[in-house]
Image (cartoon, grey):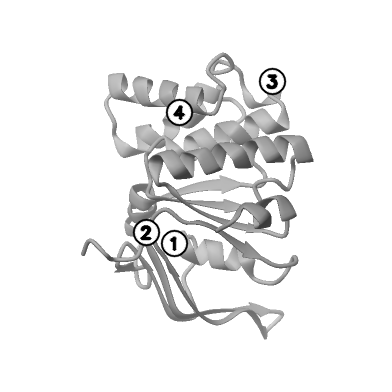
Amino acid sequence: MPDEPLLRLEQAAKTYQTDGLPVTALHPTNLTVGRGGFICLAGPSGSGKTTVLNLMGGIDTPTTGRVLIAGQSTTGLGRAAAAALRREHIGFVFQSFNLIPVLTAFENVEYVLLLKGVEEAERTARVEEALAGVGLHRERHKRPAELSGGQQQRVAVARAIVGAPPIVLADEPTGSLDSRTGTELLDLLRRLNRERQTTFVFSSHDPLIIERAD
């Protein structure tokens, strides 16, 4: 349906077992995310922000309740089906960047399109566009160790957006950056949000993000 929310949590809760004892990471939660949002899940460490992002991204499933990505429930999906759902709808930006150290910036971004089976000519054009969009075209042949922390995070952003997902989930994306670099990154993400209508959902306790969120 055209008005179907991108993401929806319906009384979703998550409980883990630690040394045989139940630990509640998320109490039953309802949340709807529509297109074009710039949303921050704010709270201190341990409040459940990353748990919510993992549920939203289909990396984890709720103990009770449901999570729906583009109208499809993540409960009961096999690993292959869950991975396919993520590839189609979700981009991820991690605090620790999660770049592959032996690959160049270009190859790290291209990897997403390889998984999607995109033809080489189109892959090249889309990777070049994504890296240019984050200001890293000149650095495209450098490996992560040759890039600054801010540049590595920009590669991670390019990788998240190159497949044109409708939603990008970003877990503490400024946590490893100084305030100036963090501000530049957020300005970039806000521009992508406005120009492409890409929805961003952040987890953070960083005032830089909280102040810019819708």
Residue 24 appears at what percent x and percent y?
64, 81
**What crowding class fits label 4: few (fewer than 14 Cα within 10 Å), some (14-19), or many (20 or more)?**
many
Residue 105 appears at what percent x and percent y?
55, 24
All told, the count of numbered labels is 4
Which residue has dot 3 on it? 146
Which badge, 2 or 1, comes first in the chain's sequence? 1
SS at badge 4: helix
Nearer mark to the viewer, of 3 and 2: 3
Which badge, 4 or 2, comes first in the chain's sequence? 2
Q: Which residue is drawn at 65% across and 28% down?
A: 151
Q: Do the residues labelled 2 and 1 touch (CB within 8 Å)?
A: yes
Which residue has dot 2 on it? 82
What's the distance in space between the residues labelled 4 and 2, CA to CA? 25 Å
Nearer mark to the viewer, of 1 and 4: 4
What's the distance in space between the residues labelled 3 and 2, CA to CA? 34 Å
Q: Camera-side residue: 37 or 100?
A: 37
Residue 1 appears at what percent x and percent y?
21, 64
Q: Which amino acid does label 2 sit on?
A: Ala
Which residue has dot 4 on it? 130
What's the distance in space between the residues labelled 3 and 1, CA to CA? 32 Å
Image quadrant occupied by the C terminus: bottom right
Q: What residue type is labelled 4?
A: Ala
- Taking 169 as reference, is 46 left or right? right
**What crowding class fits label 1: few (fewer than 14 Cα within 10 Å), some (14-19), or many (20 or more)?**
many
Which badge, 3 or 1, comes first in the chain's sequence? 1
Which badge, 3 or 2, comes first in the chain's sequence? 2
What's the distance in space between the residues labelled 3 and 4, CA to CA? 19 Å
Which residue has dot 1 on it? 58
Which badge, 1 or 4, comes first in the chain's sequence? 1
Is 24 placed above or below 156 here?
A: below
Q: Which quadrant of the view contains residue 77?
A: bottom left
